[in-house]
Image (tube, rainbow, N blue to C red):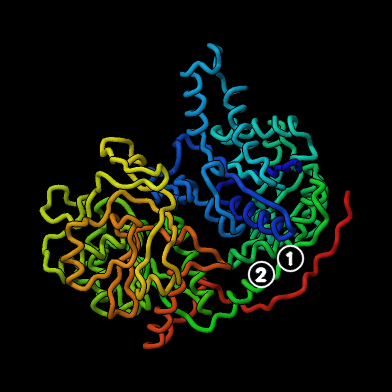
């Protein structure tokens, strides 16, 4: 049986350097070498999971098939590896401590004194080594936070111990650090990297590879200096340069020779990476044949990371239709009866994403009304579907005070409500929601089946009768109003297999008007765009041809034209 090799990625100097992108890109390169790869994110915060964290603080909550609410980096992992992640791919300090405390309460430690070392570190090592087996060649472990933070110390101590437990041939430490360029001095500065590595070494971890996050490539002389002061091989210092499109990063790392050095140090099979698909992808991104402008009308627009998977899924839809995507983020609180036309004009497509709480909802409902009446392609996701149902009930079906139980608990016409009993696909039985339970316990989470109605836009997109999509919501379409909504012209094109839950709604006679209760963005891949995003962008592309095209924007697919090229990478001798 093959032994799993472990790569630990840490970060220094400051947060948001791109550890997740580095982990995903390296994973893609190793997979392109024919290896089986998985990735795990260890987050230092005390929340058990990010499910109840404010998106404007933490960013998007990514949901896996098994219903785990995880860090947004797992979205990068899935998009780059094309492999579904699960609960075992993301742990937090909160979940680790929760597990240890639960064991202590059961008496698992036989009355011993429970301490950070060895009990917390042993639990961390347990979740890391759980990735072994099932033919996994390489497990990449990303440690969240920054070296020197008090929160991440148990994780760093655990991986330090693991190298002794597993042996140096099975463990590799990669440290991502900042190498800033000072324009006034006209040079890169290595001192932040030196201090960061010194901090890492002070706790017993000696990095094998250093990734230098920088605006422009680090010179060979500077790499030599970093290698000398940080005590690593000269050919183990690599540039991680800012790119105008994130899907270029695997190719950039390949040209640097990162995967080759990793393979040498971990004694992985000597195969070259087959990057034909990645080269084709980047070529398509850099050669759009048009531009479409999509408005995302949400309540968390001040932090674009809150809609990370949506952003990427729209770009994937652009790839499928050979167009650049210009994204216009619109605060739904600013959409009013007086401003709606001005704010929403000039859009080729409108997307209303999910969210929780009443803030900004009326702006979303007005947005739906504009898209429906002006025949602008519309895509509503989760709360977006619910807003579409409310708007239709009010303005077409004649239920003027229609609302959601979430926003008006005492209202008479709750067309969206909290269904108290439903069939849980994971538990294979009917369950009752307890509104007094913890927040996560009231939600429908993870992948659920959906039966599609033939002859609809949804069926045309998927091309099959049964699909599985990921959910993250509490409120459902109230079945008591399905008849009156249907008489008004709304089509329920996707239902749960038992017919109890509305999953997809659409309006015939509209260029493209569809809402889904699930989150299709979580399953979109750059090389396999999600069918709903593909068809939404196709409709927006047709819409764009009705008025002058907007100038291209690097927000979407990027602008710099380039063609696939043969690698100039030279083989590096083993040191």
Q: State how far apart marks 2 and 1 are (Cα).
A: 8 Å
The reply, left or right, for residue 299 in relation to residue 121 is left
Q: Mark 1 packing: few (<14 Cα in 10 Å), some, or many (20+)?
A: some
Position of 400 compared to 502: left or right? left
Residue 78 is situated, as x and y percent measured from the top left of the image, at: 56, 56
Image coords of residue 175 (percent x, y) = 68, 45
Q: Which quadrant: the N terminus?
A: top right
Seen from the viewer's position, the closer of residues 24 and 497 is 497
- Dots 2, 1 in contact, CB < 8 A: yes
| 138 vs 492, nearest the viewer | 492
Where on the picture, by quarter, is residue 155?
top right
Residue at figure coordinates x 72%, y 54% from the top left? 35
Q: Quadrant of residue 493?
A: bottom left
Please give the residue where the numbered disc 2 appears in the rendered image. Answer: 277
Q: Is residue 125 above or below residue 511?
A: above
Which residue sits at x=61%, y=28%? 121
Residue 377, x across and y down, in percent: 34, 76
In the rendered view, would you say 406 is above or below 361?
above
Residue 262 to residue 516: above or below: above
- Residue labelled with disc 1: 274
Q: For the residue labelled by badge 1, is the local secondary structure a helix, a strand or a loop?
A: loop
Residue 306 has which mark? none
Count neighbours of disc 2 (C-alpha within 10 A) and say few if under 14, some if 14 to 19, many if 20 or more: few
Tell me if I can see residue 83 in this picture: yes
Residue at point 46% right, 70% down?
Answer: 531
**Element type at marker 2?**
helix
* Residue 555 appears anywhere in the view: no
> Which residue is at 37% across, 88% downward?
546
Q: Position of residue 99 (x, y in %)?
A: 50, 28
Asked which quadrant contains residue 141, the reply is top right
């Amino acid at each position: 049986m093959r032994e799993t090799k472990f790569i630990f990625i840490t970060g220094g100097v400051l947060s948001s350097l791109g550890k997740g992108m580095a982990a995903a890109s390296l994973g893609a390169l190793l997979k392109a070498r024919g290896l089986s790869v998985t990735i795990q994110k260890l987050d230092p915060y005390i929340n058990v999971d990010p499910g109840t964290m404010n998106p404007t603080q933490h960013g998007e909550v990514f949901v896996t098939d098994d219903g785990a609410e995880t860090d947004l980096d797992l979205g990068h992992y899935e998009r780059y590896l094309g492999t579904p992640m699960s609960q075992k791919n993301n742990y937090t300090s909160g979940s680790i401590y929760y597990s240890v405390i639960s064991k202590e309460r059961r008496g698992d430690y036989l009355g011993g004194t429970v301490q950070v070392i060895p009990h917390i570190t042993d639990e961390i090592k347990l979740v890391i080594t759980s990735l072994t087996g099932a033919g996994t060649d390489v497990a990449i472990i990303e440690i969240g936070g920054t070296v020197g933070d008090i929160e991440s110390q148990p994780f760093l101590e655990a991986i330090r111990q693991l190298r002794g437990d597993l042996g140096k041939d099975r463990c590799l430490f990669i440290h991502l650090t900042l190498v800033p360029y000072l324009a006034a001095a006209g040079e890169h500065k290595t001192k932040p990297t030196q201090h960061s590595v010194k901090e890492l070494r002070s706790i017993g971890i000696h990095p094998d590879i250093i990734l230098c996050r920088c605006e422009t490539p680090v010179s060979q002389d500077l790499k030599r200096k970093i290698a000398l002061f940080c005590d690593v091989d000269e050919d183990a210092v690599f540039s991680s340069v800012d790119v105008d499109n994130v899907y270029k990063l695997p190719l950039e790392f390949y040209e640097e020779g990162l995967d080759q050095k990793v393979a040498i140090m971990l004694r992985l099979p000597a195969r070259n990476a087959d990057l034909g698909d990645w080269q084709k992808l980047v070529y398509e991104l850099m050669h759009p044949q048009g531009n479409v402008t999509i408005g995302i009308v949400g309540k968390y627009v001040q932090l674009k990371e809150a809609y990370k998977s949506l952003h990427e899924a729209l770009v994937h839809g652009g790839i499928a239709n050979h167009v650049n995507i210009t994204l216009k983020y619109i605060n739904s609180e600013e959409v009013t009866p007086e401003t709606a036309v001005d704010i929403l004009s000039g859009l080729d497509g409108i997307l209303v994403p999910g969210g929780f709480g009443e803030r900004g909802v009326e702006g979303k409902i007005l947005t739906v009304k504009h898209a429906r009446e002006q025949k602008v392609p519309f895509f509503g996701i989760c709360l977006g579907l619910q807003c579409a149902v409310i708007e239709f009930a009010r303005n077409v079906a004649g239920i003027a005070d229609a609302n959601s139980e979430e926003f008006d608990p005492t209202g008479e016409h709750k067309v969206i409500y909290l269904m108290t009993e439903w069939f849980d696909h994971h538990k294979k039985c009917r369950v009752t929601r307890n509104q007094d339970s913890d927040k996560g316990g009231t939600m429908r989470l993870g992948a659920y089946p959906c039966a599609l109605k033939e002859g609809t836009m949804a069926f045309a997109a998927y091309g099959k009768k049964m699909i599985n999509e990921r959910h993250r919501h509490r409120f459902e379409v109230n079945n008591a109003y399905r008849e009156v909504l249907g008489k008004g012209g709304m089509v329920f094109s996707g239902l749960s297999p038992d017919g109890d839950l509305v999953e997809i709604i659409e309006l015939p006679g509209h260029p493209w008007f569809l809402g889904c209760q699930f989150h299709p963005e979580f399953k979109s891949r750059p090389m396999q765009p999600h069918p709903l995003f593909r068809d939404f962008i196709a409709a927006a592309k047709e819409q764009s041809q009705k008025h002058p095209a907007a100038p291209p924007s690097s927000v979407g697919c990027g602008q710099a034209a380039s063609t696939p090229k043969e690698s100039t990478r030279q083989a590096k001798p083993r040191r």
